Amino acid sequence: MKVLRYALKALLCVAGVFLIYLILGGLLPFVKAKKVDDDWAKAFDEEAFYGNGIGPDRAAVIEDSTDALDIRIQMFEQAKERIVLSTFSIKIDRVSEEVMASLLAAANRGVKVQLLIDGLSGGVDMKADPMYYAAGTHPNIEIRYYNIPNLLKPWTLNSQLHDKFVLIDDTCLLLGGRNTSNYFLGDYNSKVLSYDREIFVYNTAHSTDLTSESVMTELYEYFEHLWTLPYTTAVFDSIPFYKEERAETAEEHLAEVYQTMKEERPELFAEADYEAFTVPTNRISLITNPTNLGPKEPLLLYQLSSLMTSADERVFLQTPYAVLNRDMYTLLRTVAQTVPLFDMLLNSTSVGDNFMASSDYTFNRDKVLATGVTVHEYQGDHSTHNKSVLIDDDISVIGSFNFDMRSVYIDTESMLVVHGEEFNQLLEQEIFRMKEESLEVAEDGSYLPGRITPAELSSSRKLLFRITSVVFQLFRFLL
């Protein structure tokens, strides 16, 4: 018995040491925020975002969740050679079935399909479902995870792929904040839905020698970099023997889903006129974070900061959450002091769906207000997930980047910077429409009088926020 007790104590000791290693290894590398390399900063040229005359890329704002799903199906159907889909999360629901059914149909007609998903969320959300084996073993489809977390390297638990975009041949792209599920796309679950936004880009120079001038070239290069990283791993490329029959059934089901879509929404399978609903732009550029695992230099924030601080008249920032460190507070103060109009629109804690970010905002709300930015808190019926910036009347930014420390220093992120007055007006309309469902916050934290009623925060949630808003300060650099 003594030997057994000693063995048990030793085992508990080892488990305790490993738990401490996991906690410290997951936290300590991210405590100190990295700075942008001096040489990189010196080489940065803000003028590169501006174009002379009309460029090859036309663009539109995709605001409605149903439109967002429909245009994906339409894009997949138009593909002739290649489809790229990068997403933080894809689940097992009706939207994911429609997406996979469309991708499988494209692969059956000879289109090469590449899916890139975050390793942590993919492992949780996709659950090794037979549907993904049916797709992943198709000769024209390959599925890869960015960074499958390794418990022996606990810092990998925090490094996530947050990019969401679709590329079709050299013809068109879609990029923004929507993940691939009922929560963001379609109207299959309108009671539980997140508002979001994407930019659709049509390359008018496709299939010509001028196609290299489109932002699609930049995004393909970025995707190829992600796709070939040593910690990007192929998955669902072989079927376990005990899932073979279920995979066959899943493939048959996807074929039925595709046929149903063709019968019920035939307009998505007709020839698309992308020029009709897009507007011309002068230039569209891609900005991204580094792709290494672990803490990252804030390259995307640096570029965004440069554009914001050089504005002449206005900056309007929309973000789902605001979780800021000292450098980010300083940025807000600088913009507020140098730009005549500086507004920020984000979720009120009553409607926000990110509990940890709302907890942090509860604790640090006064610090945000003290920077001088005019804050508008959204009071609508659903949480917003929109990430956009308006700068003066000719620069617009849309993408996956939240104004929080995770997006700045930890995750991969991508945004498109659009130079063009017509697109700026389109984006302004959508942002200001949501502003109308928001309330401006006074310096003392109260709401200024408005035409809408503030959303109510339940008593239990208020009490919980009082506790979690303090506790989460210990590791807020991960939020």
Image (cartoon, rainbow, N blue to C red):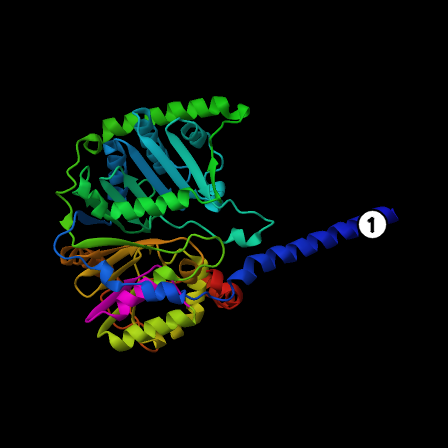
Q: Is residue 155 left or right of residue 180?
A: right
Residue 450 in percent (x, y) is at 24, 68
Residue 317 in percent (x, y) is at 28, 64
For label 1, the residue is: 5
Q: Nearer the viewer, residue 474 or 313?
A: 313
Q: Residues within 10 Å of mark 1 (few under 14, many from 20)?
A: few
Q: Which residues are magenta?
A: 302-324
Quarter of the figure with residue 242: top right
The amino acid sitting under disc 1 is Arg
**In magenta stretch: residue 160:** no
Q: Is residue 191 visible?
A: no
Residue 285 in percent (x, y) is at 26, 54
Residue in the picture at 44% in, 38% down: 144
Q: Is residue 282 left or right of residue 403?
A: left
Residue in the picture at 48% in, 21% down: 245
Residue in the picture at 41% in, 33% down: 142
Quarter of the figure with residue 207: top left
Q: Which residue lies most toward the right here?
A: 2
